[in-house]
Image (cartoon, coloured by chain):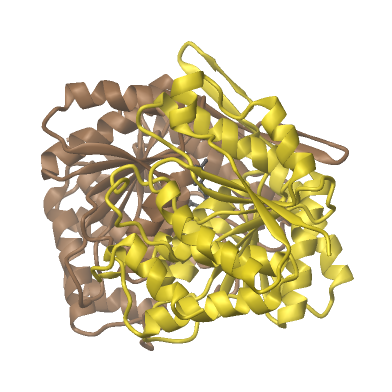
Chain colours: A yellow, B brown
Amino acid sequence: DKTIRIALIPGDGVGPEVMAEAVPCLAWARSRGRNLETLPLPYGADHFLRTGETLPGTAFAELRDGCDAILFGAVGDPRVPDGRHAEEILLRLRQGLDLTVNFRPCKPRVPRSGPALDIEVFRENTEGPYCLQGSTEPGRAIDLAVHTEPAVRRLLEAAFDHARARGCTLTLAHKANVLKHGHGLWMRVFQDLQRTFPEVPAKGMHADALLCALVQDPSPFGVIAADNYLGDLISDLTAAFVGGMGVAPSLSWAPHRPHRCSALAEPVHGSAPDLAGQGLANPVGMLLSTALLFRHLGWEPEAGALEAAVAEALEAGARTRDLGGNLGTVAMGAAIRDRL
Amino acid sequence: DKTIRIALIPGDGVGPEVMAEAVPCLAWARSRGRNLETLPLPYGADHFLRTGETLPGTAFAELRDGCDAILFGAVGDPRVPDGRHAEEILLRLRQGLDLTVNFRPCKPRVPRSGPALDIEVFRENTEGPYCLQGSTEPGRAIDLAVHTEPAVRRLLEAAFDHARARGCTLTLAHKANVLKHGHGLWMRVFQDLQRTFPEVPAKGMHADALLCALVQDPSPFGVIAADNYLGDLISDLTAAFVGGMGVAPSLSWAPHRPHRCSALAEPVHGSAPDLAGQGLANPVGMLLSTALLFRHLGWEPEAGALEAAVAEALEAGARTRDLGGNLGTVAMGAAIRDRL
Ligand SMILES: CC(C)[C@H](C(=O)O)[C@@H](O)C(=O)O
Ligand SMILES: CC(C)[C@H](C(=O)O)[C@@H](O)C(=O)O
């Protein structure tokens, strides 16, 4: 049983606070016989302001070839103008490690009334406007959104696969009537995969109409696939249905495993500078991301146990402030780990 | 008192059905002494399929220089692949007439519980990816989003002006951390106008976080300004709060009045091919758009009366199917006009 090496990048703001709640879960997995070791890394605003380094090339190579996965807190700090270091770290990891698939499940975490809800967003994670190509001239600015067939196909294959396994519908969010080129490519690959997966009820929907339909009634939706930009928007929107960004997890991975490191788990919330340093952040998004990583590593019992512990703690009424309660980060983390 | 000439473009699908409910409101305004005449134009799918023409140059010139405003139904028809004629008509009008500002108010039309809500979206209407520039190569496709300072400034000035007059907040939706160039330009103009309008409480918000916040609680928002793409998405989302797309109106205008024709009123809903020909479409979006046009022409009494008639009809329980009732288009239109 080879050692699984997990890099820990707490990052900025509330990142280190929620990471501190996840680390004991790794120790718990080890205590249950999982062969893992961790590699804590200091990258983020403090390191950048001290050294001028965002994510040095040697560290990136060590992550890529010397680790199996990354557990990530959040990056972003008001002391760094334009969040420059943030995108250099986060987008570099997503793109440099070819983490095409960003999986963002939206299941109700907090007991709620209304119809059942189980939306899972598959967001392409490396392309679109996140390629950061463009130009600024006097009085005029242009951004490019780049889409390539291999990435689009990998994302959609993962989404179709998942919808087939779950036996649910697949909705492709697009705006092909305007983004003729990029979303034209998405539509062609989508139609191609509809032939490969005839058993999946799949349809495309204009993103504007989709947002309206989601807000009116999210219950009919199952898997939603989208490009990087729309996926960013839609997954934050759907997070609002299930308790907000504080409870939303994500896992990114490279289905074609081009490197040793092929997965990154991170909560959907950001560094939340306003909240940082007060011990008030909700660790649920981080802990559920850790569970997604366990599942990705094949550690299903640990993944299921951690998700169950979160569900039981929330059912028992444990709540951080964003959920209307008064537990701090540490107490919320403890309420969950006590149930492991 | 010079004659106001209003072009009528019913278009496709449910467009002609809802237009038929608006036309008597124009006659009513005339009966009250408003000096107006109408110019019905046939452009849309039928005309395109019969003649190959979308919006011929002579017709465009007649609209631009021979009319004061356009009342527009909807375009889009499944018989025309990719909706080609639709964008050639609608985007040509928005762009060719420089209709930079697209105003989409979201006020609750149907009585609802919960906190008060009065969101007004100012969407830039001519640029971003709607410039339709890009390229498709084998395995790779690129769309460009173009932003120019004059259009951004006109849109934001209109939004600041309106927020100042209303005494409400202004939120700029952006993703400047990714769309460095285009949204970088938006941020610069926004910050510049914050200095010109110091009395308006204005702030920028990342679009992803904004969508989550809107779904969690839309009540704190006042004016929301956005580029063309985000404005399209956000205005459909907020329409869901107030009864759906069937009741959402819009008015586009050119603040700098470069042509005689400087405004276009159209419902936010599209041609809804599934619903077309059945007399079931909701005319409220169209009638409220007509009211916005009346106001734009300086006919405030007629604008207010038409809005009040809509409100009274809805309060009295008049409902089309999309609102859970069983009135058809004509009966709903009559229920409203009876209250004029
Ligand atoms: C911080 C930002 C660049 C990032 C994104 O847009 O992808 C974030 O919003 C997310 O969703 O992970
Ligand atoms: C039909 C389509 C091109 C249009 C748009 O995206 O602008 C529509 O969705 C709208 O909002 O008016």
Q: Which image quarter holds the C terminus of chain B?
A: bottom left
Q: Residue furthest top?
A: A138
**Residue A69 in the image, given as x and y percentages of width and height:** 70, 52
Q: In the rendered view, does A46 fall on the left or right side of A206? A: left
**Residue A218 in the image, given as x and y percentages of width and height:** 49, 75
Tell me if I can see residue A181 in this picture. Answer: no
- Asked whether A188 or A145 is in front, the reply is A145
Q: In the rendered view, does B155 fall on the left or right side of A180? A: left
**Residue A161 in the image, given as x and y percentages of width and height:** 79, 70
**Residue B311 in the image, given as x and y percentages of width and height:** 19, 71
- Asked whether B130 or B76 is in front, the reply is B130
Q: Compared to B315, does A149 lie above or below? A: above
- Asked whether A135 or A209 is in front, the reply is A135
Residue B318 position by quadrant: bottom left
Q: In the rendered view, does B193 fall on the left or right side of A243? A: left
Q: Compared to A197, does B253 lie above or below? A: above
Q: Which image quarter holds the N terminus of chain B?
A: top left
| Residue at 84% across, 76% down | A198
Count up the numbered dots: 0
Residue B65 position by quadrant: top left
| Residue at 68% across, 54% down | A37
| Residue at 58% across, 39% down | A41
Q: Compared to B319, does B183 lie above or below? A: above
| Residue at 37% across, 51% down | B210
Tell me if I can see residue B172 in this picture. Answer: yes
